[in-house]
Image: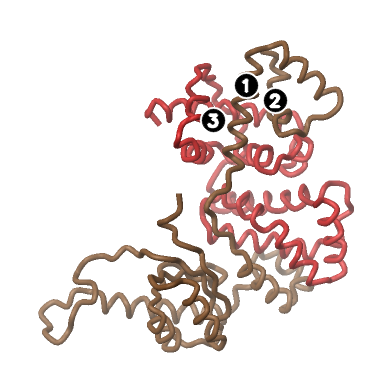
Chain colours: A red, B brown
Amino acid sequence: MSDEAAHLLKLIGKGDEAAFADFYRLFETRLYRFIKSKLNDSFEAADILNETFLEVWRKADTFEGRSKVSTWLFGIAYFKTVDFMRKRKLVLVDDDQFLDIVDESDDAMACLLSKEKGDHVRFCLETLKLAQRSVMELAFFEDMSYGDIAKVVDCPENTVKTRMFHAKQAMKNCLSSRLGGTA
Amino acid sequence: MNKEVERLLPFYVNGTLQGEEFERVEQAIKADPDLQKEVAFLARLRDEVKTPQAENSPGELGLKRLQNALRQGGRTSDAAASASNVVPLRNWGWRATAIAACLLLVLQTLVMLPAGTDDDLTSAGSGSITIPTGNIISVTFQPDATEENIRNLLLSVGASIVAGPSALGVYKLSVTRDVDAVVTKLLLRRNLVETAQSDGNPAAKP
C-alpha cells in the first residue's frame, strides 16, 4: 500500500484527478476515523477531512518521500484537527502533565474480557487527553512505529513513548473503574 | 518491571519494533511474568481499538465535493485557502440551499404544532415530539434547487430532514421505506439532488 500511495501521490502532483480519487478511497475511512475520534462531531470531521485532501492536492508535488505517505497525510490531518480545536478552545493540546496513578489490579484485563468490552474501550478512549488518544490511535489502529508517530504529531520519539505509557495507564484505570461500575 | 522495556511494549505488540530493540524487549518478556501480563493486556486493547466501528464517513459524497472544489480551482486557490482556512466548497449556492431547507423546516414545524382551537386544522404530530427513526440518507441538493421543489421531492419519497446542513451542505434524511429505493428515486432527480447515499439505520447499530 505504501508503494501504491507514493505512486498515486506522484501522479496527483502532476494534476491527475483519477489518481486523486484513488488516493482518497485508499485513505478516506481511516483518516475520517482518526479525525472524528478527536472531535466527536461528524460534520466538523468531514470538513477537516475535506481540507486535508485539498491540501494533498495542492501540496502533492512538494512531497519528497522522506517519510511514508501515510505519516505525511496523518500529520496534515492531525495539525488541521489541532488547529481547529485550538481556535474553538476545545482542548489544551500540549498538556503532557498526566496524572499517573497506576491500577495494578487485574480488573482492566477482566474488563477487556467482558461482553461489553467494545463499549468500555470506546468510552475510555474518549476520556483520554488528545495527546494520549492520538498516540494510542496511531499505534494501535494504524500500527505506526513510535518514530512515525513522532513525525505525525511533531514531537520527540521519547515523548511518544511516554504519552503511550500514560495512555495505557489511563486506559487501565478507566477500564478497572468501568468493571467496578464506578465510572 | 523494566520501565524502558515497558514503554516499548505497545510497539512490540503492534509489530513495529525492530533489530536490537526487538531482541531486548523479547528477552525481557520471556524473563518477566509481569511483562507477559502487560503484553496480553496491550494485545487485547489493540484488538478492541482496531475493531471497526459503525461510522459513516463521507465516502463518495466527500469525493464528489472534492472534485467540485478542484474544478473551481483547488490548486490555484492554494494561498487564499490556506490563509483564510476556508473550505472552498462553502459557496453561495449552498447557502441558498441551506436557507431554503431552513424555510422547509420552519414550515414543517408549523404544521407539527398543536392546532389549538382551530377546527379546520389537524395537528400532524398530535402534540407530541417525534423522534426520528428509520434509515438515514446523506444528501446534497443542487445549488439552484428551490425550497418548493425540495419539499415536494421529500414528501413524494416520504423523507424528513433530521440534521444539517453541514458546512459542506450535507443534509441527513430519515426514511421509513426501502432506503435503497428512496436513494434511487432521489438520484433520478438530478436537477434537484446532486448526491445521495444511504447511511443505514443508526438505531440498528451496536
Query: Could you tell me which residue is drawn at 75 percent across and 34 percent down?
Result: A146
Residue most extreme to the top: B31
Can residue A75 be seen? yes
State the image quarter where residue B9 is shown: top right
Residue B146 marker: none
Q: Position of residue A96 (x, y in %)?
A: 62, 31
Image position, residue B186 (x, y; %): 50, 81
Q: Position of residue A169 (x, y in %)?
A: 57, 25
Judging from the image, mark 1 belongs to the subunit labelled B
Lower position in the chain sequence, tag 1 or tag 2 = 2
User: In the rendered image of this protein, does residue B51 appear above or below residue B41?
Assistant: below
Count the numbered circles shown.
Answer: 3
Mark 1 in CB contact with mark 2 (< 8 angstroms): yes
> Which sits in the foreground, A180 or A50?
A180
Asked if marks 3 and 1 touch (Cβ < 8 Å), the reply is: no
Q: Please state the chain letter of the residue tagged with numbered disc 3 in the rendered image.
A: A
Mark 3 lies on residue? A171
- Is residue B132 left or right of B97 when viewed as pictured? left
Helix, strand or loop at label 3? It is helix
Q: Amino acid at mark 3?
A: Met
Identify residue for label 2: B9
- Disc 1 is placed on an element classified as helix
**Residue at the (55%, 51%) spot, across then down:** A39
Which kind of residue does numbered mark 1 sit on? Answer: Glu
Badge 2 sits on which subunit? B
Name the residue: 52% across, 51% down.
A40
For marks 3 and 1, give the one nearer the viewer: 1
Label 2 amino acid? Answer: Leu
The reply to the same-chain question for discs 3 and 2 is no
Q: What crowding class fits label 2: few (fewer than 14 Cα within 10 Å), some (14-19), or many (20 or more)?
A: many
Question: How far, Cα to Cα, is label 3 from label 1?
Answer: 13 Å
